[in-house]
Structures are given as C-alpha cells and as structure tokens.
Amino acid sequence: MGELLRARGLVDLIIPRGGAGLISYVVENATVPVIETGVGNVHVYVDAAADLDMAERIVVNAKTSRPSVCNAAETLLVHRAVADEFVPRIVRALAASGVTLHGDAAFTAAGATPATDDDWAAEYLSLDLAARVSRAWTTRSPISGAVLRAHRGDRHRDLDTARRFVAGWTPPRSW
C-alpha cells in the first residue's frame, strides 16, 4: 500500500474507507492528494412498525456476515414500542450466532452484558454489538445504517430494499 500512497503522477486521489487506524495511516503517509473521510459506526434501528421477523434476520446478518469490516453493524437501536417483544428474541438470536451484546437495562435484563459509555461509539470490528431501547428516530440523529420502517415515506422501496438486503443485495448508492 505504501507505493500506492506515494504514486504521484499515477494516482490522482485516494479516498480511504475503513477504520480510524487506516484513515490515519493513509493521511500521514500519502504524498498524493487524500480526501479524509470521517469515521463512524453503523447503527441498525428497528422502528415500532417494523416487521420483527425481517428485522431479526437483518440485525443478525448486519452483525455476523462480515463483522470485521467498517460497514458491519456496531449499534442496535430498538423503538421502545416493540422492545418488550423484540429485545428478548434478538438477544437469543444474536447469542446463538456468537455475538456479545453490550446493552442498556432492557437488554441486560434479557441477558446482555451491561454497556459502558464507551460502547455507544465503539467500532468493535468483531462479534460485539451495543444495543439499547430508543424513543424514536429523528432526522437530526447522527446515525447511519438501516432504518426498518413500514408506515411512511417510500414504504414499498424500503421494504423491497430490506428484503433484498436480507438476501445479500445492496441497493444503489443513490438511494
């Protein structure tokens, strides 16, 4: 990778995608122009109107299919209206898949490890997942990831995209 970072005249631009360590390495070692992207962590939000069977499959897939990549789920938020039903079942499903949950009171009551303040921003890159019950999704939430909803907006596209995601398809970036 070092040669690529110093390939002035051959490489016009590098946009590193990954964890903080990779981004920092590229910025510090490149002699070609670099667009420094932000680091963050992928959240999956299960809305009150979500299909909980589908949500369970999506959450398990989002965490377990490739947990060491930068686009793996790192935090699960569950709307409080479905928490009593969904939290115990997702704790069981994730535990059966080898995932260690770091949760709030609702999740620890269902068997998760108690979360610390650091867990809410952690990029685990492993079979660890922070989880908590949330009041609602807002457009001002600093969260990226999958929003599982079925009651407003582009309902049919959202559901179709979710079904394809479970099957392993990724929608175009323009969505």
Image (cartoon, rainbow, N blue to C red):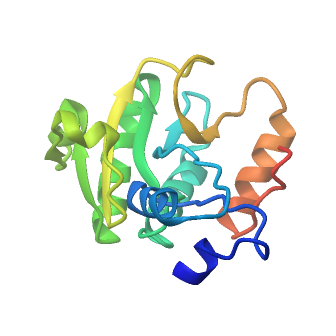
Name the residue nearer the viewer: 87 or 63. Answer: 63
Residue 50 seen by the camera? yes
Residue 91 is left or right of residue 155, and the answer is left
Q: Quadrant of residue 11?
A: bottom right
Q: How many numbered markers are drawn?
A: 0
Q: Residue at x 49, y 72 (%)?
A: 66
Residue 9 is left or right of residue 84, and the answer is right
Q: Residue at x 65, y 49 (%)?
A: 35
Name the residue nearer the viewer: 170 or 94. Answer: 170
Quarter of the figure that contains the N terminus: bottom right
Residue 1 seen by the camera? no
Residue 9 percent across, percent down from the top left: 78, 72
Q: Quadrant of residue 137?
A: top right
- Establish if 9 lies above or below 140: below
Name the residue nearer the viewer: 42 or 54. Answer: 42
Q: Residue at x 55, y 49 (%)?
A: 55
Q: Residue at x 62, y 38 (%)?
A: 147
Residue 120 is left or right of residue 34, and the answer is left
Quarter of the figure that contains the C terminus: top right
Residue 99 percent across, percent down from the top left: 30, 64
Name the residue nearer the viewer: 71 or 7. Answer: 7
Residue 111 percent across, percent down from the top left: 17, 49
- Establish if 150 lies above or below 158: above
Residue 128 percent across, percent down from the top left: 29, 59
